[in-house]
Amino acid sequence: MHPKPAALGLAASAALLGSLMSLAGAGPVATASGFSGSLVTTSTIRAATFSPSVAPLVTSVRRQATNQLSWAAVSVPSGAAVLYVVIRIPANGSPVQVCTGADTPTSSGGVVTCVDRFPSSNGADLYTEQPYLVVGGVRTWSLPASAPN
Amino acid sequence: MKFQRNRRFLKSAAGAAAIASIGTLSLGGTWALFSAQQTSGDNSFAAGTVTVGPGASSSVVCNVTGMVPGDSSNGFGSLSSALAPCTYRVKYTGSASAYLAVDIQVLAPSTSLPSSAALYDSSATGLQLLVTSGTGVDKLTYLNGTTYRLVDGSNATVAAGSTVSNLLLSTSAAATDDEHEFDVNYALPTLAGNVLQGGSATLKLTFRAVQAGNQSSAGCSAGRQCNTIVWS
């Protein structure tokens, strides 16, 4: 927040004019009651957005029996921690959340990485990741999941 | 008082002019024959003024950016309390005693960010605003979350885009150089929805002063809306 000094004024001339108009028989006017003035302040508040605004694609590299996953980190201006839900989408079967527990994604140098230890043997898995914020243990904002890749 | 005297003078002048006009109508061209000119001694008719200006160390613009759910300013009373509130000092600079009030308007989205989402939506999960003045037993609350108080003390919701007028600062008239400090605190609840990402809102406070002479604050209470005083 950066409060900035500025100047704003006001005037009583309209009210005085109103009084004069009433005396001159120009009919009632709203400002005839007397002098008045005002000062205006504005407080503008804006919420954060994720950067980037679209969840980055996941890149998968086969390494022995695991898949090494990586994607560009997502952040918010306030520096709040961004976490990720990573989903494996096999060619056959249901999507499964991966990179959980001890394999939870870690971020370093703008890149997030994690390991899927049990990928499909046919190598046809796709992955998505969904960034989200946690505040006080509550999951709050999130981005739509990335496109499967 | 000086203003009243001035009005009496103006009324007298208007009356004299009216009599002169009647005389012109009835006597026709004789008006010129009876004319005379006399210069009076200096007369001063100083009207009182009702003005409001920034107080000491004032700021009239405050910008907060990058709020996420769970953020709040340190005077809000809950959530993170990690952000600084917006503080304004308002000084009454007029010479005539005056009643002071504040008008509240919440614009969402902010006019400077018209394509952004409306951060304030009058709900419990949108932006919450707390507008107060004074401290301790003198503390007054004008906007509490999303509501203000009507003249009877009941709560009413501040709708985005509409103006809540004439929230009275005090039932006593202000004197020259009286200062009031206003704090604007804010919070974004943890349940704020995804749609509020990048949203914006502007809180506009208009501090009003109007002459206290020939007006009464009877029936009004500080911190509530007061419409019995004629404010403009």
Image (cartoon, coloured by chain):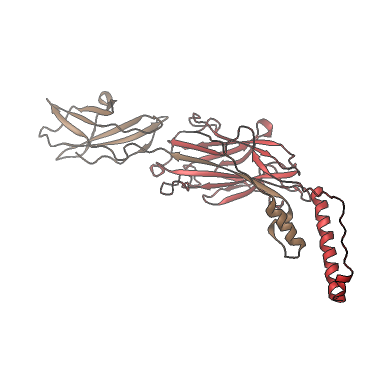
Rendered shade, chain A: brown
Which chain did the image draw in red? B
- The answer to whether B221 is drawn above or below residue B28 in the figure is above
Residue A67 lies, in percent from the top left, at 16, 29
State left or right for residue B132 relative to residue B118.
Answer: right
Most extreme residue toward the left, as rendered? Answer: A122
Front residue of B185/B144: it is: B185
State left or right for residue B214 relative to residue B108.
Answer: right
Residue B232 visible in the picture: no
Residue A148 lies, in percent from the top left, at 21, 40
Residue B138 visible in the picture: yes
Q: Quadrant of residue B133?
A: top right
Q: Residue at x 43, y 43 (%)?
A: B199
Number of numbered labels in the structure image: 0
Q: Residue at x 46, y 33 (%)?
A: B71
Residue A99 lies, in percent from the top left, at 24, 29
- The answer to whether B107 is drawn above or below residue B74 in the figure is below
Residue A37 lies, in percent from the top left, at 67, 47
